[in-house]
Amino acid sequence: MTTTTDPVPSGHLQPPASTTTEPVSAIPPGHGNDTTSTSDTTNSKPSSVRAGNTPSHLNLETFPTTTGPVLDTSELPGLPRLNYNLWDYKIKLSIVTFLLVLESSLIPLALFYGLWFRTTLRHGIIFAIITAFFGLVTGIEFGLRSLKLILPPDTYRPIGGKRWKADFTHWTLSFGYTVMTGILIGASIPHEPLVRPLAIPVPLFMIQMGLMLIATGYMNVKHKPTWCRMSSVPKGERTRPLVYTIVEDIIAVDGAAGLEYRRAFMARYEVSKLFRKMIAKQNWFWGWGSLLVGIGTMVVIWTVQQEIAYGIGWGVPLVWTIIWIVVTVVWVRRDLRHEKEQWARDAMSSVSNINIGEQNGVAAAT
């Protein structure tokens, strides 16, 4: 018995006898580490993408147009999800923020002006009362952080971190608060307290953080290695902006996101060029802002009357922080939206390239 093969209809291409699907990368072109070669990034394709089978969440119809729907970026191949929403913890976040604002600004200002001008208490007693309140909230928070970091499970510790070693943010804040507390105690000891030095702890802390942010930003740009372990970044690896470390540590420990978030945050940083740019921009924004406002506040403190200087020293940092946080929230949301949209476009471009390449291959085979 003879078996015949139906002829290929006109307008169709005869597929080759056998085809194989090459594995593809999860990173669209133009992403990945800065050290990745051009050839590697050019040939990379998104995962879960096969020729002729465009994922539903990358449908061309969902791309933004002047009159059509916007791009759906709820799921993106190869882009690690952070799986953390601050608004899920809005009650805790609001309480902690309110207590920190009370401790770092409102209570010192209220006690100073209320007791200084409305009572006959000796000035040394006034500042003893103020100093007693300073560090109360942060002391409790530091205690909870320490407990989380030394618990037997490594739920909250940095990637590769050891049980009895705190994360980098913990050491950074500990140094700053130790200096601030020392100034408050030392300047309160004289019979007539030194009001201007008592007004500089927060601006001085801002200068410290500004210098660290700028220094790590510079080291990152110049591809300098870290001098020590910075939380999940081992010693000797390329330095990352301090904003990266602070966000990782605060959300992982204080936000209770844990080790899973640290891994996702690191993966997102490593594969997404736009995410790295966003972190770098925020690092410069907070670094230069903190440094310049801190220095400017210090200058004003030493040039105005001491009663005014105290209000400047404890009030200006709060106003600056509120403004910077509002700008940061708007800025980061915009950058994250742009990152996801660009990632989806790159993925769609990869899909198109795969389809065109395979069609050309089929045509050549026939």
Image (spheres, grey):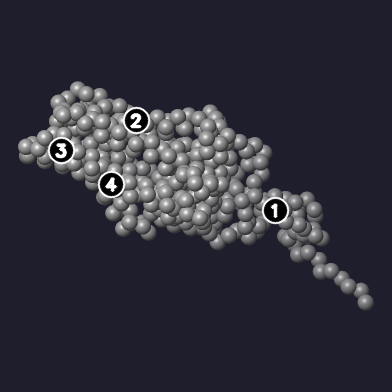
Q: Which residue is mark 1?
A: 23
Q: Nearer the viewer, mark 4 or mark 1?
A: 4
Q: Which residue is mark 4?
A: 136
Q: Can I make out residue 19 in this image?
A: yes
* Quadrant, the C terminus: bottom right
Return the disc, 2 or 3, that comes first in the chain's sequence: 3
The image quadrant of residue 132 is: top left
Return the disc, 2 or 4, that comes first in the chain's sequence: 4
| Residue at 6 percent of width and 39 percent of height | 118
**What amino acid is labelled 4 in the image?**
Leu
Q: Where residue 28 sits: x, y (%)?
A: 59, 47
Q: Where residue 331 sits: x, y (%)?
A: 38, 43
Crowding at dot 1, Cα within 10 Å, few <14 / some 14-19 / many 20+, comes out as few
Q: Where residue 43 sits: x, y (%)?
A: 66, 44
Return the disc, 3 or 1, that comes first in the chain's sequence: 1
Tag of residue 207: 2
Most distant residue in the top direction: 303
**What amino acid is labelled 3 in the image?**
Ile
- Distance Cα–Cα, label 2 vs label 4: 23 Å
* Quadrant, the N terminus: bottom right
Q: How many marks?
A: 4
